[in-house]
Image: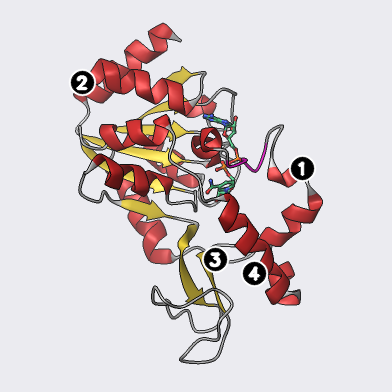
């Protein structure tokens, strides 16, 4: 692992543009379970089906109740990995492309006192609500589960459920960043959820060097020049120490 960290430090210190492709593993050390793996939410069918559009269509109110509980569970703090990534974001031209809906990276950036950084939320975020029917974004005061003031549709979290399309604009912005990156960090993602997982492939096809930080081998490992087998909280902290 030591040598791999050395290689990552070298690559990051000579890069102009860096993107971080972030997955659920990044927030595991904050206490939010991942989808796959031993503690994965997808091992529990009663939870798994709640992330599907078809369940939401059948039982919208029940799904929103589930999400309310889920959001309370997400009321946790950033972990050392989020703070280290916030520090890394200040060292190069930097874009985060995140599959996470928890907002913990932005919280870490704000707590460090940095200006907001560009973050592409390809699966949306729990910190916003929108109308399920007309897509109107809710104001801060509007609550999940209320009727939309424009069309009376149901206000729901602005996240992408399985069976729902991604936001084209957000996805295209992520693709452009991947095309232009020198280095792409893969942080705590299994790389199994498409089309999100196409982003590292776009980076690789356009000449970026990929660095993976994950305790386990993944579908994307074969694309990576550097593979650091460890937790993002520990590894990113070491990287920042060496780069500072
Ligand atoms: P995933 O659950 O498929 O895979 C998690 C990956 O993280 C695994 O490869 C695992 O080895 C790795 N991992 C576990 N602990 C880690 C740690 N401490 N440090 C580094 N890596 C660690 O996650 P995914 O690839 O992001 O895809 C699942 C989907 O789940 C995403 O679309 C995302 O929207 C959603 N999701 C989000 C959250 C969140 O917002 N925190 C939580 C669960 C699921």
Q: CA distance from mark 2 to mark 4?
A: 44 Å
Residue at 59% of width from left, 66% of height from top?
A: 164
Query: Residue 96 location in percent, x, y?
Result: 35, 44
Q: Is residue 164 shown above or below 38?
A: below
Is residue 79 visible from the viewing direction of this image?
Answer: yes
Question: Distance from label 4 to label 1 (Cα)?
Answer: 21 Å
Percent x, y for residue 76? 50, 45
Q: Nearer the viewer, residue 212 or 223?
A: 212
Label whose residue precedes the other's in the sequence (3 or 2): 3
State the extent of the magenta-drawn residues as a range: 32-36
Which mark lies nearer to you, 3 or 2?
A: 2
> What distance separates the C-alpha of mark 3 from that of mark 1?
24 Å
Q: Is residue 164 magenta?
A: no
Q: Judging from the image, what secondary structure is the residue with disc 3 in?
A: loop
- Residue at disc 2, secondary structure: loop
* Residue bearing mark 2: 244
> In the image, what residue occupies the spot 30% across and 47% down?
177
Give the Cα separation between the discs numbered 4 and 3: 19 Å
Residue at the right extreme? Answer: 45
Label disc, if present, on residue 165 of the rendered structure: 3
Nearer the observer, disc 4 or disc 3?
4
Depth check, front residue: 72 or 197: 72
For label 4, the residue is: 64
Pointers 4 and 1 in contact (C-beta within 8 Å): no
Q: Are marks 3 and 1 in contact (CB under 8 Å)?
A: no
Point out the frontmost of discs 3 and 1: 1
């Amino acid at each position: 692992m030591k040598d791999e960290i050395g290689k990552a430090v070298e690559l990051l210190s000579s890069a102009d543009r860096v993107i971080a492709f972030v997955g659920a593993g990044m927030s595991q050390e904050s206490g939010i379970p991942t989808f796959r793996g031993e503690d994965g939410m997808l091992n529990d069918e009663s939870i798994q089906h709640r992330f599907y559009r078809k369940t939401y269509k059948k039982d919208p109110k029940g799904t929103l109740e589930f999400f309310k509980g889920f959001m309370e569970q997400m009321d946790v703090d950033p972990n050392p990995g989020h703070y280290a990534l916030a520090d890394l974001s200040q060292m190069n031209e930097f874009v985060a492309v995140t599959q996470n809906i928890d907002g913990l990276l932005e919280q870490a950036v704000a707590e460090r006192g940095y200006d907001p950084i560009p973050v592409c939320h390809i699966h949306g975020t729990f910190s916003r609500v929108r109308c399920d029917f007309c897509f109107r974004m809710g104001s801060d005061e509007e609550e999940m589960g209320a009727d939309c003031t424009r069309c009376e549709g149901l206000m729901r979290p602005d996240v992408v459920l399985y069976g729902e399309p991604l936001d084209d604009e957000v996805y295209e912005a992520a693709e452009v960043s991947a095309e232009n990156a020198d280095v792409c960090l893969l942080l705590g993602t299994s790389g199994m959820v498409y089309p999100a997982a196409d982003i590292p492939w776009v980076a690789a096809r356009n000449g970026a060097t990929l660095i993976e930080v994950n305790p386990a081998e993944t579908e994307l490992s074969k694309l990576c020049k550097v593979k650091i087998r460890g937790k993002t909280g520990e590894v990113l902290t070491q990287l920042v120490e060496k780069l500072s």
